[in-house]
Image (cartoon, rainbow, N blue to C red):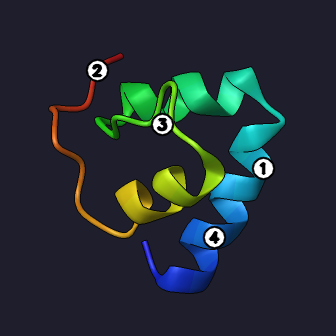
């Protein structure tokens, strides 16, 4: 994701457990991370395969 989108998404995920679950399902390891860490994770490709 681009930098601005990843920052916005990290802020939104901070207040939404559902969004965290969606990112995890997309292969992004964001659970238990700070807002800044989530933004960094989202700036890179997913590390796991997409799950349904």
Residue projecting furthest to the right: 15
Report how far apart the C-alphas of labels 1 and 3 lie in the structure.
Answer: 12 Å
Marks 1 and 2: CB-CB under 8 Å?
no
Mark 4 or 2 closer to N-term? 4
Say which residue label 1 marks.
12
Q: Is residue 47 depicted above or below 10 in this figure? A: above
Where residue 13 sits, quadrant-wise, is: top right
Q: How many marks?
A: 4
In 3D space, how far apart are the residues under numbered discs 1 and 2 (Cα atoms)? Answer: 21 Å
Residue at numbered disc 2: 51
Is 26 left or right of 21, judged from the image as shown?
left
The local secondary structure at tag 4 comes to helix
Give the distance between the C-alpha atoms of the residues marked 1 and 4, in whole angstroms.
9 Å
Name the residue beneath numbered marker 3. Answer: 23
Position above or below: 25 against 10: above
Marking on residue 7: 4
Q: CA distance from mark 4 to mark 2?
A: 23 Å
Task: Estimate how packed mark 3 is, as few (under 14), some (14 to 19) or many (20 or more) residues with alpha carbons within 10 Å.
Answer: many
Residue at 48% x, 37% y is 23
Residue closest to the far top: 52
Element at badge 3? helix
List x then y, in percent, for residue 44. Answer: 27, 65
Q: Closer to the camera: disc 4 or disc 2? A: 4
């Amino acid at each position: 994701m681009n930098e601005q989108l990843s920052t916005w998404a990290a802020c939104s995920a901070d207040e939404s457990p559902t969004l965290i679950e969606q990112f995890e399902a997309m292969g992004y390891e964001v659970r238990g991370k700070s807002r800044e860490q989530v933004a960094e994770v989202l700036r890179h490709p997913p590390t796991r395969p997409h799950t349904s």
